[in-house]
Image: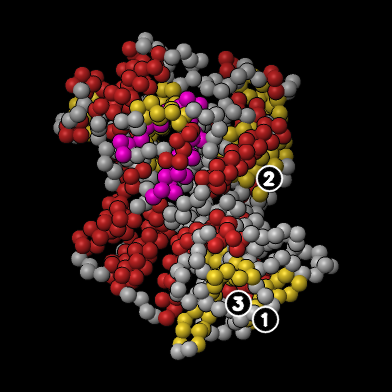
Amino acid sequence: MHGTTGTRRTGNTARCHRCVGTGGLEPLEAFFEAAPLSAGWAFVVVQHLSPEYRSRMDELLARRSRLAIRPVEDGLAIEPDTIYLNRPNAYVEIVDDRFRETAYSDEATRPHLPVDAVFQSLAGRSGGFSLGVVLSGSGRDGAKGARILKAGGIPVLAQTPTEARFDSMPLAAIGEGAATRVLSAGDMPRAIAELLREASGARSGAEAEEGALARIMRLLEENRKIDFTAYRHANVQRRIQRRQQLRGFERLEDYAAFLASDKTALDQLYQDLLIGVTQFYRDPEAVVALRQKLLDPLAGAEHDGTPIRIWVPACASGEEAYTIAIELTEALEKAKSNRKFRIIATDVHRGSLERASLGIYTPSALANMPSGHLSRYFERQGNLFVVDPVLRQKMIFSTHDVLRDPPFMNLDLISCRNLFIYLREEPQAQVLSMFLFGLRHDGHLMLGGSESVGRFTEEFATVDARWRLYRKTTDRRFVDPAAMHQQSLPQSRTEPIVNRSRSVAQDRTMIADIADIRNRDVLIKSYNLLLRRYAPSSILVTGEGTVLGWFGAAAAFVDTMNNLADWTVEDIVHPDLHFPIKVGMEKLRQGALEVFTRSVTVTLVAGRQQQCTVRIEALEQSARVKIMLVAVTMEGGEEVLPPPPGPARSAATTCPL
């Protein structure tokens, strides 16, 4: 954990301005790489240290910063342009711009909370500018102190939880409502400088524009739940400036104020920012490469009846998704295969998805379409062309934010062309980790002609370098834990849990990246093993009827084959179970659900009947999202159940199948 202190000089005196926070080595390195060397700031780093541990933090930070580095000493006066490190076994407080150390009591029965202690002392400081920073760390130390700082008008910065290796400390501060801003460690020094300028009332025109841009970003996220800070700054700024000019505003600050008061104008900006560029048979050579090197072999391969699964994220108005559907249909017919397929096409822009779902296009949109395909897969209606209903039935269009939502699973192909060129480096890596998690072993990924798999080159084999077609070569599944923690259903049915301000993080070392990935992989595998071994045959349901997941033999009563978008009891759970579940839902919503059981006869495939006992109990009745467990026990044991129709389901499922 660390604190930073800025100073403002008046004559020959220096008035100290401080911020204190939490964090491990990686965020500290990112922070100090970006911190100014001669701004007159002082930095106080507070860590949870074992009594026997000899910290090498001074050596490690010296590699990243030329600032002076000193240990905290009792009575030491704080000097500017210096990093101070706490010592084990002692609380650190700041009193009259000097350090005060107090040894831990040997008789203490509660955990030591050194960050809360230094925050609380900082809250009592008079004069100068002070600021608290909460970085990666375990536990809740700092949350109480951050709340005290915020109440005293002292800003608190919290690291973006998606960036933090250990997110419980930032999340605790955010959960207390104490975070003034949530951003990456590498962006914090710039934010501190901005807050210091705001406090002294000395902001230049350029700085004012940056502030206005940040306000616009926050308006978009609050109203549209889209975090545009993940996108390249220049691209977003150009679109905003275009709308600003169309509205006739000379200053961005005035345009930001206008957007705050006019929802229609904000919606127009949102629409402009998300307009996608796509077309049928874009880059015809790329389509040929995809057909020859993946779709034809996939169509001709032996299979067990499992449908081919393809995901087209950021599909815009659907042209690329339909192109792949046409080529796969042709490949299957050429191979004389009756194998089925489905293409899941997703986007955050609901208007584009509505157009894609309608499947109605102008002649100019179909200019690159081979003539034989045009007559076969489209029906002309006046001056428009409508997608053939048979082809349309193989498509699923769904609202999904690839930067927030979990991936679709067991995929043979992900085609994501020309999205990455708009994203910053770290969000690109987050999305790629989700793609790796969703792809089958030997599944394929197709990117745009100027895009690459970046740091994940060892996880893919290159199938076509020119057209960026890759094959997954690992059995490991990488996942961004933040995306999995935030939600496990398509975004259209969920609300964000925390403020997800995503700024580009400073590059981490390759060793740290590998360790992070391995830790995540082990954690996900461990969760799966625990669920398979100990979870009862059951279904997780909210009070509103949303199905969160299912375990064990209960998969026989859940069918998502024709519905990836709507995970509700009504849509995917066996009808014979609806009545007892709905009774439980009503009681759960009222906060009065006690454990109860019902005997139910369930009609399975081929008219076979199975006697079941349904046991319903509340898991959470006090939170905003109320959850209950529907346990299903089959008379005669679970082995009497026939296999569920369609592709095999995993024993534990919490993501879209």
Q: Mark 3: few, some, or many residues within 10 Å (few <14, many ≥20)?
A: many
Q: Is residue 447 magenta?
A: yes
Q: Secondary structure at mark 1?
A: loop
Quadrant where the image shows the N terminus: bottom right
Q: Amino acid at mark 3?
A: Leu
Q: Give residue 36's position: percent from left, percent from top.
A: 45, 69
Q: Is residue 630 visible?
A: no
Residue 50 forms part of the magenta stretch: no
Q: Which mark is residue 618?
A: 2
Where does the image place residue 565, in percent across and percent down from the top left?
45, 36
Q: Which residue is mark 1?
A: 75
Q: Could you tell which of marks 1 and 2 lies nearer the N-terminus?
A: 1
Q: CA distance from mark 1 to mark 2?
A: 55 Å
Amino acid beneath label 1: Gly
Q: How far apart, in angstroms, are the residues tagged by discs 1 and 3?
A: 16 Å
Nearer to the camera, 513 or 499: 513
Tell me the magenta residue range: 424-450
Q: Which residue is mark 3?
A: 122
| Residue for point 34% across, 30% down | 465
Q: CA distance from mark 3 to mark 2?
A: 44 Å
Rendered view: 164 above or below 378: below
